[in-house]
Amino acid sequence: MCIRDRTFAEAVLLETLVLSIYNHDCAIAAAASRMATAAGGRPLIEMGSRRTHEEAGVAAARAAYICGFSTTSNLEAGRRHGIPTAGTSAHSFTLLHDTEEEAFAAQIAALGKGTTVLVDTYDVTAAVHTAVRLAGPDLGAVRLDSGDLVTQAHEVRALLDSLGNTRTRIVVTSDLDEYAIAALAAAPVDAYGVGTSLVTGSGAPTAGLVYKLVAREDGAGKLVGVAKASKDKKSVGGRKYALRRVNHSGDAEAEIIGIGERPANDGNDRELLVQLMAAGEPVVDTSADAARAHHKRALAELPAGAKRLSRGEPVIPTEYLEDAKPSPAGRERPDAAPSAPA
């Protein structure tokens, strides 16, 4: 991020606010993108509001939607950002009634046969039979929230099909993360509900972004680079550019960060630094749907290796250039600088 044309006082006031947003939202977005990849096109419901601060819950729902989740259970996120909302019944709703049948009947009467009923409050098999008896083949979905989800999904699918409910979907929840979702890939699951692991970053609660001053105006009004020279936390001064190098097939080859003159662009390279604000007003579409579309396009540029959940080397390299000169060939890359800019 570049904060330009601001005084130092304004920059340090913005620092904490901007970093708090970016560190939180980027961590949630990264987790959501991994989970959406693991889901392989099956819908994901964001259900994490009870596991975080109320405003963080809205931000998490937005970040999740941008990076592949289909819906959220957070109604404020739906109101504020236009994110589609969805949810299922709760165990407490079933326990509120004298019998499970009364609970299901009340839910179906209020929401229609296409609703999703929670079937593991007592006995899953008995609950599925009850739900089918009340709603028939138009029952929308059943939710599983405990136990061996893989085994239960197979058993419930077979039971639903035997009862004629071949179109009734199966939704699974219960502390899912990207690895649990991947493990359910071969199971007859139609949708996932994810809460705690998503809104806490699934092992990475912060993106680790920091603020570094890299340039200041001198007495003559000229922008000059500044950098830390401490032993373990050196930085590289100077205003940076950043772009993604894309080949003629639309596949990303590298991400380029540098200082000075940009390398030659054959027309495919995409700028990564985009001006968001001017005179205190947004100059681009900042809606959740626009960000979602951008994420989809950016993800499509990455090679297949980016979809692995296992740890490993970056799928595309990051190259650091300093005072790069245009290449007549348009594709030659200058030697990488020995140290990375901040």
Image: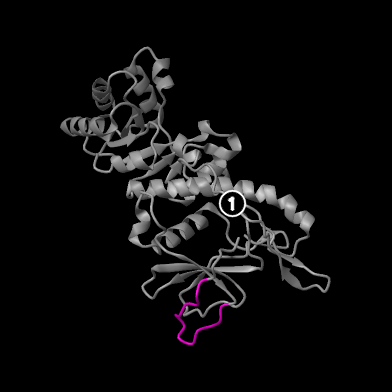
The residue most toward the left is: 162
Q: Is residue 218 above or below residue 155?
A: below
Res 215 → quadrant: bottom right
Q: Residue at x 31, y 25 (%)?
A: 119
Q: Is residue 320 above or below residue 29?
A: below
Q: Please state the horizontal and vertical placement of residue 173, each as a whole percent of the image.
A: 37, 33
Magenta-drawn stretch contains 326:
yes
The residue most toward the top is: 98
Q: How is the image coloured?
A: one colour
Q: Quadrant of the N terminus?
A: bottom right
What is the three-letter code of the residue carrying label 1?
Leu
Q: Is residue 2 left or right of residue 328?
A: right
Q: Quadrant of the C terminus?
A: bottom right
Using a 10 Å C-alpha cutoff, classify the residue at mark 1 as few (fewer than 14 neighbours), some (14 to 19) or many (20 or more). few
Magenta-drawn stretch contains 295:
no
Label 1's element?
A: loop
Q: Please state the horizontal and vertical placement of residue 243, each as a whole percent of the image.
A: 52, 69
Res 221 → quadrant: bottom right
- Can residue 83 be seen in the rendering of this structure? no
Q: Residue at x 49, y 48 (%)?
A: 29
The residue most toward the right is: 219
What secondary structure predominates along the stretch shown in magenta?
loop
Q: Please state the horizontal and vertical placement of residue 336, each as a whole percent of the image.
A: 51, 71
Q: Is residue 7 above or below residue 112?
A: below
User: Toward the viewer: 26 or 322?
Assistant: 322
The residue most toward the bottom is: 328
- Can residue 18 be seen in the rendering of this structure? yes
Part of the protein shown in magenta: 324-336
Residue under label 1, please give it: 209
Q: Residue at x 35, y 49 (%)?
A: 310
Q: Residue at x 55, y 54 (%)?
A: 287
Q: Is residue 116 left or right of residue 166?
A: right
